[in-house]
Image: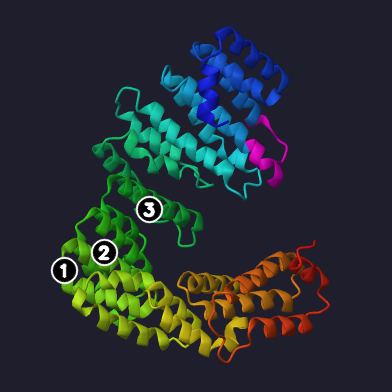
Amino acid sequence: MTHDELRTRLAKLSQERLAEFVARLALDIPELHERVEALALSGDPKSLGRLLRKRLMAVKRGRRFIDYRQSRAFAVELSGWLADVGEGLVEIDPKAALGLLEEFISSDGRILGRVDDSIGLIGDAFRLACGLWHRAASKLPASPDWVKRVYDLHADNDYGVRDALLDEAALRLSELELRRLAKMYEEEAGTPPTRPDNSERDWQAHSAATSMGQVALALKDAALYEKSLRIRSPQLNTIQATKVAKKYVAFGPVEKAVSLLEFSQSADRDLGQLDVLAEAYEKLGDSAKLRETRKRLFERSVSSEDFAAYLTCLPETEHAKAKKSAIAKVRTTGDPFRAAEFLLEIGDPESAARIVESASGGLMDEYYAQLLRLAKGFEQADQFLPAILCYRALCEQILEEARSKAYGHASRYVAKLDALNLSIDGYGDFSDQVAYMAGLRERHARKHAFWRRVKGVG
């Protein structure tokens, strides 16, 4: 029964029957008791606030280390507490909710310091709390204190989970307030250290500059974002310039993105820069430079996606010539199977088939995932001989390496070979299915578990 079906059926039951069932369920399952109790108190904000604070204090007082295996259950506990705050208090008593959430966020060091949060679920709970804090704050009257309150709460962000406060800052703060907050971070970032080797001060300044950049993103202000980077790096490196250019493409003015990337020689531009330039030229409507950049992107990446994007810049009359040139370019990579995959993706399975058939001796050395993509691509394109060669290589890779856990896959590839054999007109210089299977049995006769799989036994 789906969630919606279950909800519809439960809605038809009497209130008394549902209340009795939920109360009994809460007694039988201790993990549910606190959540059910919070639900029962949702009409009484003072009592609910006391209950939620009691649960929070229990979490904060905890000293036991929570290992990786227990972290998921602990994350569910924290998320349940946040859900009760969000559903029970934010709307009816946002001030109380705000106080609880501030206390929770401020406990990040104590809580994360005793948890193995390798999968990041505990950190996610704190990020959710930051969003809830802004939601609650947005329901309270405007005040000049909000900027300082965000600034203070974001401090001591040693675990990075409070970054979400700045990501969500536009929910609570006006544009003017956001600019005040950015100015506070700018002043902190620009304060020189009291002594040359003050690494702690340097880290604080770097952190403040990063926070300024986050506020700039909330404002969608690319120039302010660039300024936040130049505080610590007056001369932007290639990676930084590309990051800033992306922001100008997203927020404008787009011309700044182009001028930022012009410092590097076009031949040395990496794929990231070329991709940003292409976006910029597309937004600016500069078709000539867009076409040139898309071509350069393809020539650097030799990917079907970049070739398809390049084709969209050309009139249809030039597509055939561009395709011929692209095929020649791909062949120069020295990787015949990458070339074959490219040809399949751009709709030339015949040329791809000829490449694989002529280079079939190297199929066994290819990555399993690429071989499987090639096999399926050829099969879908009705190019059965190269598909068979790929499935043979997939099967033999497993057998040569004696990967017994993969014998089920290998047996399915044999079944695939039998099926494709019915569709093929001839094998040319390659062994037919009967001869191939005879050779396979001779080479791997002692792999009994595999042959039992082929027979459908085991």
- 118, 95: nearer the viewer: 118
Q: Mark 2 packing: few (<14 Cα in 10 Å), some, or many (20+)?
A: many
Quick check: marks 2 and 3 in contact, CB under 8 Å? no
Disc 3 secondary structure class: helix
On whether residue 191 falls in the magenta region, the answer is: no
Say which element carries label 1: loop
Asked if residue 79 is positioned above or below residue 374 in the image, the reply reads above
- Is 63 one of the magenta-colored residues? yes
Where on the picture, by quarter, is residue 400?
bottom right
Neighbours of disc 3 within 10 Å: few (<14), some (14-19), many (20+)? many
The dominant secondary structure in magenta is helix
Checking the image for residue 286, the label placed there is: 1
Q: Gap between marks 3 and 1, in whole Å?
A: 34 Å
Q: Which amino acid type corresponds to the residue marked 3 in the rendered image?
A: Ala
Residue 265 percent coordinates (x, y): 28, 80
The C terminus sits in image quarter = bottom right
Outermost residue on the bottom side: it is 429
Residue at left offset 35%, top offset 24%: 139
**Residue shown at the point (38%, 28%) measured from the top left:** 137
Magenta-drawn segment: 60-74
* Mark 2 and mark 3: Cα distance apart in space: 27 Å
Above or below — where is 86 with respect to 168?
above
Q: Secondary structure at mark 2?
A: helix
Q: Closer to the N terminus: mark 2 or mark 3?
A: 3
Image disc number at residue 279: 2
From mark 2 to mark 1, how far is it between C-alphas?
10 Å
Q: In the displayed structure, does residue 447 sit left or right of residue 111?
A: right
Please report the residue visible at 54 percent of the width from the left and 16 percent of the height from the top: 48
Amino acid marked by disc 1: Asp
Give the labeled residue for mark 3: 209
Nearest the eye: 236 or 183: 236
> Could you tell me residue 240's position as x and y percent?
35, 65
